[in-house]
Amino acid sequence: MTEKKKIRHILGLSGGKDSTALAIFLKDKYPNLEIEYFFCDTHKELPETYDYLKRIEARLGIKINYLGATKGFDYWLALHSGYLPSPKSRWCTIKMKIQPLEEFVGDDEAVSYIAIRADENREGYISTKPNIKPVFPFREWGLVKADIMKLLEDSGIGLPDYYRWRSRSGCFFCFFQRKYEWVMLAKEHPDLFAKAVEYEQNHEDGRRYTWTEGETLLELLSRKDEIIVRHHKAMEKEQKSYANQSLSEVLDKVLDQEDEESPCLVCHL
């Protein structure tokens, strides 16, 4: 008789608050469940993201598998002839997030735990492979954003440091960044901002690609005072409307007002 293969349990960590809170939640509710934790490494993450992942490992006593370590962004950018990813061409998500996950699982039966909350009206696209079954524990248990924040606080893990100025995980040059986040990237990590500018400008055949639609990063940065003033006014308005909110919650709402496209959830949970 052929022995039935063991079902694998996997949880992708993005370096953001929701997937981290899910790791905390599952470890508490199902301490005997053998979960494989993974992070799809593009080699273009913020240093704060790597610091946060180390904090998660230390606090929870887990090991995170780093996927895609041999083929980062520059490799795939060259294969796409220098064509930068964009909301209309998200090759980065496919090549550096979904494919590494599917290679990690192979043909094994797997349950993939996805950190979409009960108060979110969105779906998480992880894989279309029939052997990978998506499960949404936060929805099943009715957990909302306030519950996630409490899980992070009670665990001692807290929020990643980049939440002071940015509300999502992802590459430092992610095209889903809002204009204020680009301005703050230039302030917090001028070397990374300069690298993002280099990606825009480094096209030998004269093509003009930009991370943000309609303007280059240098053009955006030239308007930084205007962008910062508008952001601060929006923050003050939001704080007056909801005085009991934390600064991170206010920032999250204000930045969401800039969104025109939905982010890739496999990157930003």
Image: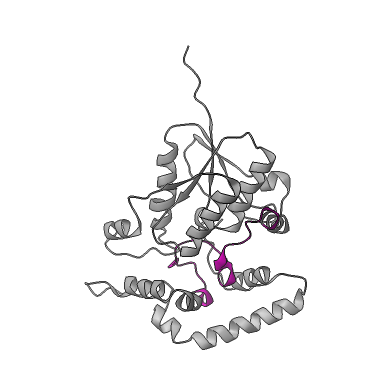
Q: Is residue 158 magenta?
A: yes
Residue 209, visible in the rendered structure: no
Residue 159: name its quadrant: bottom right
> What kind of colouring is applied to the model shown?
one colour
**Residue shown at the point (39%, 82%) measured from the top left:** 218
Residue 257 in the image: x percent, y percent? 61, 72
Q: Examine the rendered structure and indicate whether residue 14 appears above or below residue 64.
A: below
| Residue 145 placement, left or right of 221 | right
**Residue shown at the point (60%, 81%) measured from the top left:** 231
Q: Examine the rendered structure and indicate whether residue 55 appears above or below residue 2.
A: below
What range of the chain is rendered magenta? 153-181
Q: Examine the rendered structure and indicate whether residue 172 appears above or below residue 140.
A: below
Residue 129 in the image: x percent, y percent? 47, 38
Task: Give the residue furthest to the top.
Answer: 1
Q: Is residue 110 magenta?
A: no
Residue 260: name its quadrant: bottom right
Q: Nearer the viewer, residue 163 or 56?
A: 56
**Residue shown at the point (54%, 67%) measured from the top left:** 162
| Residue 155 placement, left or right of 268 | right
- The secondary structure making up most of the magenta span is loop
Residue 139 in the image: x percent, y percent? 68, 47
Residue 188, visible in the rendered structure: yes
Q: Nearer the viewer, residue 9 or 189?
A: 189
Q: Which quadrant is home to the C terminus?
A: bottom right
Q: Nearer the viewer, residue 77 or 166?
A: 166
